Amino acid sequence: MTIYDIATNLGVSAATVSLALNGDRRVAEKTRGRILEYADKHGFKRNEQARNFRLRRTNNVALVVHNIDNDFWHGVVKAIEEALGDSFNVILCNTDGDPAKERRIFHNLMQRKVDGIIVQPASADERMFEETIRGGIALVSLEETENELISFVKGNDFKSARRLTEACIMAGHRRIAFLSFHFDCVGLNERIRGFKAAAENAGIAEECEVFVAEEISFEAVERIFGDRTGDFSLVIGSDDRIACQLLRVLAARQVRVPEELSVIGWNNSRFLEYLTPTLSSVAIPMPEIGRRAAEIILKNLDHGPIVVKEHVDEQIFLRESFAPFQPNK
């Protein structure tokens, strides 16, 4: 039962019910008594967490991400600010992808009693997020999670990776590599899973391979993939940054793109069209994700804790770095 049920059954407004349950003297004594008696009779229990969401407002919402230098976040911040409105302040926090630093930031934000947190998780450990929500702070993750307490807004990495790989197979590619890097991230793992699913479904799993570099750097990509450039016709990078490092490795080895090896990145960073060749990529609609995440925060603040799990469709941009497979190359 909710205050709306009580209001409907007693013929009063939900605001009147809320005031009465909080002991507000602005509600007539007779009406207040009627509401309290009805609530007690029907076993109504006030949701203190919801009440905390509404009563404790700071008008501050934090965006916690791995790297604020990444232009990936430019559209997100703007979209969040616009969706929240002029009465809110957005606090931008940088974790460097470090779980320990993320925990320190969350402790500080909880002490400051921000109204909400939108977070790009630094690891798969969600205990801090659960503690934050139980403390009355609205939270939205930018990574997919099955945790029943945590809302998320995210591109569908598995679906997009499978769809991209299928499109490349349709273009004739069979020897395909997927290049990623070490990071405890659900999204990266889902991209790998989608790639593998498409390869297995097409019956080319044995011709495809996943490479995981120690870090995003020229040296790391050279070590893990430098001697394998001739084994594949296409490389899909799990991130634009590692795809760009691959382009550097290929240039140093005088491997022509896309004549000898096609390359695709992920995130559709703003600088890709300025590269030579221009880099193909998967576009995550981050402004839309930012807007939806902010709307979930507002719903929690206005109506009490709710959990929303949403996927946003991604778009594939094939540019000069990609070409259909040519058997004679």
Image (cartoon, rainbow, N blue to C red):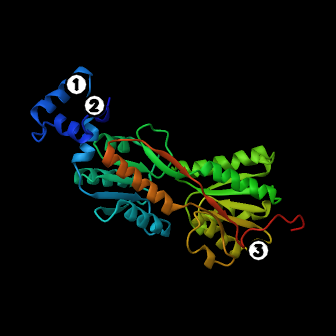
| Tag 2: amino acid | Ile
Tell whether 279 sits left or right of 326: left
Task: Assess disc 1: are there few (<14), some (14-19) or many (≥20) residues with their C-alpha within 10 Å of its C-alpha.
Answer: some
The residue drawn where x is 61% and y is 73% is 272
Checking the image for residue 38, the label placed there is 1
Label 1 or label 3, whichever comes before in sequence order:
1
Q: Residue furthest top?
A: 41
Name the residue that disc number 2 marks: 6
Looking at the image, which is closer to me, 236 or 280?
280
Label 1 or label 2, whichever comes before in sequence order:
2
Secondary structure of the residue carrying tag 1 is helix
| Tag 3: amino acid | Arg
In this rendering, is residue 304 above or below 30?
Answer: below
The residue drawn where x is 46% and y is 48% is 152
Query: Looking at the picture, how far across and down is residue 194, in whole percent?
Result: 66, 48
Residue 175 seen by the camera: no
Query: Looking at the picture, how far across and down is residue 110, in whole percent?
Result: 27, 50
* Residue 77 lies in quadrant: bottom left
Name the residue that disc number 3 marks: 256
| Tag 1: amino acid | Tyr
